[in-house]
Image: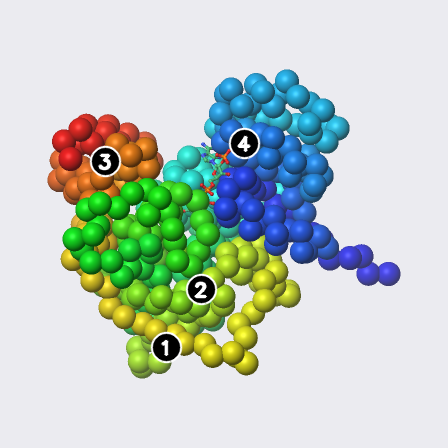
Amino acid sequence: MNSPPAKKRVVLLGATGSIGENTLRVLAAHPDKLELVAIAAHSKWEKLAAIARQFHVPHVGVFDDAAFAAARAQPAAFPPGTRLVGGLAGLVELAQLPAADTVLVAVVGTTGLEPALAALAAGKDLALASKEILVLAGKFVLAAAKKSGAKLLPVDSEHNAVFQCLEGHPHAGVRRIVLTASGGAFRDWPAARLAHVTPADALKHPNWSMGPKITVDSATLANKGLELIEAQCLFGLRPEQCTAVIHPQSIVHCLVEFNDGAMLAQLCPPSMTFPIQHALLHPARAPGVDAALDFTKLLGLEFRPIDDTRFPLLRLARATMHAGGVAPAVYNAANEIAVAAFLAEKIPFLAIPAVVEHTLAALPNFEPTDLAAVLATDTDARRLARLHLAHV
Ligand code: NDP
Ligand code: MG
């Protein structure tokens, strides 16, 4: 008698967020193929407990000290026998669990870097949503994957799309890739109106429902900037081979142009369940969680060039790609500080690019030879960006 195919055992870091919730929908739809063995979040331990009960998850990580203590004081909230771990060390431990095959990192920002490197070092496949990690330390993440032979599977929808279009195609045949951008909340706003936008305005994304940081990044187009850097790193491309176009419908997620001018595109409705499922089941395919495109209805696909003058963070991202070294890491760190300050209503929307530009200008660029140098630059950039907040 044939034994049933083994399930992929998944660790989900950032389980309580937007990517986390979409991942849970994929896991719930494929209990015969996927098994959740560990989850972690920053502080929403009650939500983690509910997920642990629903999916019978044996390992739970809580990053924040106070939330970890609160969770430990309520063992009855978790399924009997649940192991609770805390802090960054806890996340790293979960990323290396012997009983896991794939680690999905969907922690906002760069906190997931160490767990991601630990997962790759332990030979786990890494499904990566946290683009900031690649912008901060892409070459070290790629080196870790190469060393252990583990797979690095992009979850970011555009990169997952490029990954799908490139499979089976020799790298040398690629002329360029085109990432699509919805254009964010202010796609059609004139420049003059941008001076007065509020966090509530920026959080109204036209197509995608996502966490607050990435939604603001979509409104400034820093998200597309981070994604161009992410693509350059993931697919080993030159800066000029990584391009972007506005596509308001968010149905085409990328185009890959080959040397002969032919293009391949990847299409699906704007739901993260598509790339998440692709990354978790790769290379297998299975019925999707959300309905596919329906061609019995009118479907318009529109593309227009991006106006860099309204979105300086995209221009700055391109400059960092050409500069190389730690420039993308500085861009990412300063952007994180500026976005947090904007969301806390401490700086206006247009100050976000100003903080990033100042911070980039203030720090010398160099080619890092080890991770410690990148992390030190990240710390310096955050400190300088915080200083600049007071002057914008
Ligand atoms: P959310 O803000 O919705 O969720 C963030 C998640 O990270 C939460 O589970 C949060 O826990 C957790 N978290 C934050 N800090 C820590 C920490 N120090 N330790 C452990 N967990 C932590 O973000 P998104 O889901 O929108 O985005 C997650 C990542 O995925 C980002 O890097 C984003 O750029 C990327 N991404 C997101 C897309 C989307 O559609 N949302 C699309 C493509 C990429 P808690 O709830 O307890 O605070
Ligand atoms: Mg994306």
* Gap between marks 1 and 2 measured at Cα: 13 Å
Question: Which tag, 1 or 4, sits closer to the chain's start?
Answer: 4
The residue that mark 1 highlights is 263
**Residue 373 appearing in the image:** no
Estimate the spatial distance between the alpha carbons at disc 3 and disc 1, rounded to whole Å: 42 Å
* SS state under label 2: helix
- Tell me if residue 247 comes above or below residue 366 in the rendering: below
Between circles 3 and 1, the one closer to the viewer is: 3
Secondary element at tag 3: loop
Q: Residues within 10 Å of mark 4 (few under 14, many from 20)?
A: some
Q: Position of residue 195 (x, y in %)?
A: 19, 46
Q: Taking 63 as reference, is 314 left or right?
A: left
Q: CA distance from mark 2 to mark 3?
A: 35 Å
The residue that mark 2 highlights is 161
Answer with mark 3 or mark 4, whichever residue precedes in sequence: 4
Q: SS at mark 4?
A: loop
Task: Say what amino acid the circle numbered 3 marks.
Answer: Ile
Residue at image point 69% right, 27% down? 77
